[in-house]
Image: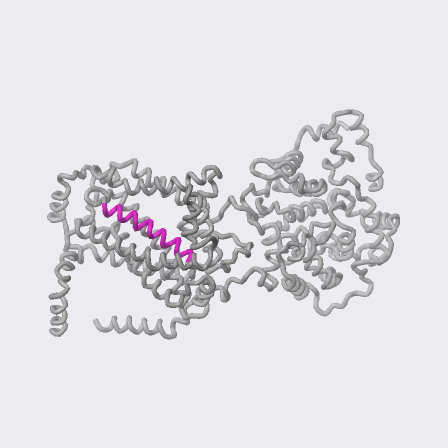
Amino acid sequence: MRAPIAAALLAACCLMSGCARHLPAMNDEQPVPRPQQIVSFDPLYGQNCSACHGSNGQNGPALDLNNPVFQQLMDDATLHRAIRDGVPGTQMPAFGESAGGMLTEPQVDALVAGMRKRWATEGTTRPAQIPSVTTTLTGNAAHGQQLFATDCRSCHSGKQQQVTDPTYLALVSDQALRILLIAGRPDLGHPGSQTGWQTVANGHAASDQDVTDLVAYLASLRSATPGQPYPGTADGVAQAVSNDPARTRLSAQPTTQSRTEK
Amino acid sequence: MSRMKQIYSWLDARLQLGKPLMEMGEHPIPNRTASWWYVFGSAAFTLLMLQIVTGILLALVYVPSAGEAWNSLNFLNHQLTLGWFLRAMHGWGSNFMVAVVLIHMAQVFLFGAYKYPRELTWTLGVFLLLMTLGMAFTGQVMRFDQDAYWGLGIGASILSRVPWVGGSLVHMMLGGPIIAGATLSRFFTLHVFVIPGMMLAFTFLHVWMVLKLGINEWPMPGRVVRRSTYMAEYHELTAKDGRPFVPGGVWKDAVFSAAILAAVAVCAVVFGPFGPGGQPDPTIIQTAPKPDFFFLWLYSVLSYLPPSMETPFLLIAPVLGIAALLGLPFYASEGEKSWHRRPIAILALTTIAVSWGVLTHLGTYTPWSPHMDAWSGGPAIPARYLQTASPLEREGAVVFQAKQCRNCHSIGGYGGERGPALDDIATRMTEDQLIRQVLQGGGNMPAYGKNLSPAEVTALVRFLQTLHPANEPSAADAAQAATQAGH
């Protein structure tokens, strides 16, 4: 009768003294912080960026941030400004508190620093011939059109990867087009998409002028009334709402813009 | 040993408790009642004792002040040896207690044990249930975090709907016009002094009556309760086919209570304590407060009720419900006890249990509520959906995210559930229907025509048109194809 009581007492003492430390501790080691106090990259990126830019900075619908060329192209201040104030002419919204978002300055800094640490390739120096993110050159749309015809059309004129669609062009700014042209979208795994700017110009790396001209050409394709539904009809809305034969005949004729496309 | 006996005799000569306690232990119970079905009441009592012990230990550290409560809970969780375990035991003890009390009540109802002469036992039991729920709610307030803060806000707004005196009631509940230190002091007093004190008194009377009136016999079809004959029949039964409570029935109570305590401890170790969540600061708006599980059903009900029904439901339904529970033993104090002869009772209990289960389950994932951060956070639209997308379609996917469509519509299993999942929307709606739905809304969806540019709508719809299984064509408008072919 004494033995079990002694064992129970021993167990109780054990629990009271030190063995208790071997019990699993709390999962979360820290109290729940205020949202503004979170400055580690993973939760911030996971709450604010991953849905558009992909959980590892790749394969999201929006620009791949996990792209060494992109990381080389952008300086810290530009990235910081883009996150804080958003990017006009694109869907990128402002996340900074100063612009009505939820992130404080240190949090934006943490995002920029985290991206650099993870996705900027260590040790590689920026190639000399890589065009810079902004330019002072003036674009020549006609030369851009020639370049497009020789170097881009084979992939980008078909229905699948058409970039000349005025609706698409209405949703991306010139700056965004320039970044996309230089950095590419290697994460998509499309043929030739691994290299971005290096494939343009007959396999030779595109110069700053080439990129500027291409952007100027694409910009010239923008329409005053983008977003017309019904592919294949130049003036789809008119056709949809009206059965007037004269109107539909008129709309079936190619406009200046779609002629430029051809 | 004789020394011990001497002390006992000295004490008992004055206290006079020995004989009544022996009588209580030896009081006869029907043989069939010494069953595993009759262990829930004693388990609820054991859990009450656990809550009192763990509660006292917690009160040694907890600081019931608005400025310090949250910190003292985090101190318990993170600094004090086994402090987290103590909090987890108290929290899980509370969950188990609500569950066991409800099961106990269902069993008593099912076995007809509320009938003559045990009407008052049931009535006190109903009050004990309300107090248990009151302890659960006030306990949630003790965990002074965001859930507690907003839970109080909900409680206050419910109370404010009482006609004429609503404002004064809220003022009384909160100890002022806002949720502040006085509110926590009030709820601390309720949770630690008022309700537990009443609970102990009611529990004593409840158990007293169980011991004095005898435990309910096993219900048999055809054995009908009549006021004039019941007591004689019961005593005859226990005399003929009974056994003393100790040890005949008590060992099952002891085993089950021990098992329940072990289950609480296992849950406490495995799942840990509840919260505290974020600081109770109303300026932190990145929060989705939720009640603890025993109030999830109410949360679901209030979410689904049309606004015009809220006040009548909140003010009338509890009164009716409590009145029905209190009135039950007086309305049906005689008659059949067996569930074989009480179809309405079975149906009522099943309906309540199933409704409660469904509403609680809905409350766990709140399909009515948009997921406010799905537009920016969480997994992206699966890569396979965008692998062959054109630049316009991909831009449409960006619009889908940036305009927060995903807060209500899931894709790839992630996103809100307020609207339908859109993984195969293109098989259900044509281009025109998609455009109309986006622009004009309808079917519980707001209109986005004024918030999206034509280019954004077109890009979005193009993206949505790609959402169909590879082996299933997307829905198409035959008239549109014919019109376009004609030109």
* Viewer-nearest residue: B410 or B176: B176
* Magenta-colored stretch includes residue B138: yes
Write the residue at 51% across / 45% down.
B367
> Please, which colouring scheme is shown?
one colour
Write the residue at 75% across / 34% down.
A236
Q: Residue A245 location in percent, x, y?
A: 78, 24
Write the residue at 86% across / 49% down.
A141
Q: Residue A240 location in percent, x, y?
A: 72, 30
Q: Is residue A138 left or right of residue B251?
A: right
The answer to which quarter of the image holds residue A234 is top right
Q: Is residue A117 left or right of residue B221?
A: right
**The C terminus of chain A sits in image quarter:** top right
* Viewer-nearest residue: B438 or B208: B208
Q: Residue A9 location in percent, x, y?
A: 29, 72
Query: Which residues lie in the magenta part?
Result: B120-141
The answer to which quarter of the image holds residue B423 is top right
Relative vertical location of residue B196 with respect to residue B299 in this rendering, above or below:
below
**The N terminus of chain A sits in image quarter:** bottom left
Tag count: 0
Query: Residue B361, can we see it?
Result: no
* Magenta-colored stretch includes residue B228: no
Q: Residue A81 location in percent, x, y?
A: 71, 59
* Viewer-nearest residue: B385 or A41: A41
Write the residue at 47% across / 55% down.
B179
Query: Residue B420, can we see it?
Result: yes
Q: Is residue A194 left or right of residue B195?
A: right
Q: Is residue A175 left or right of residue B189?
A: right
Most common secondary structure along the magenta stretch? helix
Relative vertical location of residue A22 with respect to residue B36 in this rendering, above or below:
below
